[in-house]
Amino acid sequence: MINYIPCELKTLYKQDILEVAIVGDWVLDADPPSLEPLLAEMTTSGIKRLVFSTKSLGRWDSLLMIDLISLIDQGAKQAIHVDTTTLPEGIQGLLSLVYAVPERVGARRQNTKIPWLETIGNGALHFVKETHDLIVFIGETALSVAALTRGKARFRWIDLWMNIQNCGPSALPIITLISLLVGLILAFVGSVQLALFGAQIYIANLVGLGMTREMGGLMAAIIMSGRTGAAYAAQLGTMQVNSEIDALKTMGFQPMEFLVLPRMIALILVMPLLCLYADVMGIAGGAMVTVGFFDVSLVEYLHRTVESVHLMDLMIGIFKCAVFGILIALSGCMRGIQCGRSASAVGEAATSAVVTGIVFIVMADSLMTLICNRLGI
């Protein structure tokens, strides 16, 4: 470890001249003193000239240069002549380079306060643009689906099977973990009240209906939005950065058919299966709690589950999950296609895809739940 001589600034007044002695090692690893007292002193003391003494100066680097530039700029503001002739030649040379070319007017970023009315207006314009882009993207996707039904959509079937592999079997471990934990949580939450009335057997009803109608598909969709939706946005965004999408257009391929359609079909096919798997895992998690902590046998738990969960409950959850798959693919692919041409834009596209997908999922789930409630199913 290098031992540095403590750095400090010593001031000495000679009539209207202020002499600043620079002492110690002025390096970034050292603990430099604050310049604020000296800058305030230059403002209030009424001095006309500032000189430096470097007899006790040790090692120095860019830290000393930054502080000297601050003192020189403060002197220019207060009409104080700053004498740099006593500084080492290396510092004088660097300072001459710093002030060789004057700062371009308007180059420095100005901290301006935006009026609240302008902020609201910008937000409204951004919302209108986002809505327009979404409608255009949905329209182009619908045209691609129409071309698929006519057998004219052009994409590689190997891409479809690879996407099914990536968003299907590869997602089973995380789906298993989250669904088991959700089933455990539902069982524990339900047991808090049901145990007060000795109705622990109805935990099976709660977990079965909760998983099949809502939580199984919803949790699977949220997981896939963070896992697959972000991956789609990053993949397409990287292709946008590398001009691969432009190359596809040049060769006569429609990006919506060649890139978006296989990903959407894969999610539509896989999400209902993941929903069923998540339902089973959630019911298994509820069984662990009910059988392990309460006086309920596994046979009784399964019997109550079969009695409470009907085919319509399964179909509602599967239908919801298929809709969620469409929304995840739309949000991920849309943000990827809209991505800018920089590395940071790819990260922003992936983040926006996850946020957009989850918002769409929650809104669609709320709407479908309300419709099912009003229809009595």
Image (cartoon, rainbow, N blue to C red):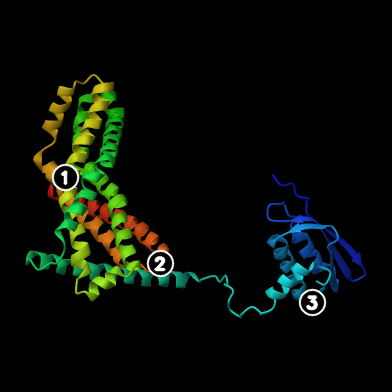
Which residue carries the number 1 mark? 273
Tag 3 or tag 2, which sits nearer the N-term? 3
In the rendered image, which quarter is residue 340 located in? bottom left
Tag 3 or tag 1, which sits nearer the N-term? 3
- Out of 218 and 190, give the one closest to the viewer: 218
For the view shown, which residue lies furthest in the top direction? 295
Q: Nearer the viewer, mark 2 or mark 1?
A: 2
Q: Quadrant of the N terminus?
A: top right
Q: Quadrant of the C terminus?
A: top left
Which residue carries the number 3 mark? 79
Query: Real-space Cα distance between discs 1 and 3?
Result: 77 Å
For the view shown, which residue lies furthest in the right direction? 15
Query: Real-space Cα distance between discs 2 and 3?
Result: 45 Å
Mark 3 residue element = loop
- Out of 42 and 259, give the one closest to the viewer: 259
Determine whether 303 is above or below 234 in the image: above
Mark 1 residue element = helix
